[in-house]
Image: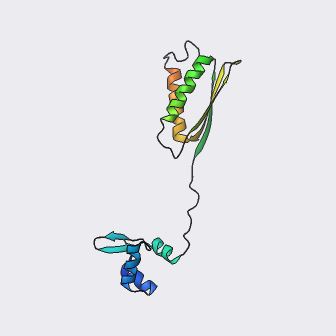
Amino acid sequence: MGNDMYSVEQVADLLDLHVRTVRGYIRSGRLRAVRIGKQYRIAPADLDALLGREQPTPGPRTTLEVSSIAQLDGVDRAAADRLATLVLAGVNTHRDGSRPLRVQTVYDEERQRMKIVLIGDAYATAEVLHLLDAVLTDGNGLLAGETHGG
């Protein structure tokens, strides 16, 4: 643990208070402390909070967000609907709710072209793209006889 935690006695000395007063602050919840065995330890941040000192706010968390568009040509409406259902089911089973993946599917009937737009977490996007690749290249009949490039 090192010197990064204060004892009750050290806090009492720093604040020019009696040890019982500091323990009273801890028991009442006014001062946060961790009990280790029979002794309390106080983190510097908790002491600062008691004294009303401002805590430095952490900077913004670095995140990675990816935008991907998968374009599928030569897809009829029924196959596009099946693919859209598959992709949405795959996304909805993704377990990390703090980093959701947004999906939009667009189908152009005239060109028989489907676009799948994925925005969000890089790992979840890669999983969906791997799922699409596996479905489209294994010849399982999802596209019902449609030809597509590999």
| Residue 69 shown left or right of residue 36 in the figure | right
Where is residue 71? Give x, y as percent.
63, 26
Q: Quadrant of the C terminus?
A: top right
Question: Residue at 56% across / 65% down in the picture?
Answer: 57
Residue located farthest toward the top when viewing the structure as drawn: 145
Q: Looking at the picture, does residue 72 appear above or below residue 128? A: above
Nearer the observer, 94 or 146: 94
Question: Residue at 58% across / 61% down in the picture?
Answer: 59
| Residue 129 shown left or right of residue 109 in the figure | left
Residue located farthest toward the left when viewing the structure as drawn: 37
Nearer the observer, 38 or 112: 38
Question: Residue at 28% across / 71% down in the picture?
Answer: 37
Name which quarter of the figure residue 84 lies in: top right
Total marks in image: 0
Nearer the observer, 24 or 100: 24
Q: Looking at the picture, does residue 17 appear above or below residue 59? A: below
Where is residue 3? Give x, y as percent.
39, 75
Residue 150 can be seen, yes or no: no
Q: Looking at the picture, does residue 144 appear above or below residue 6? A: above
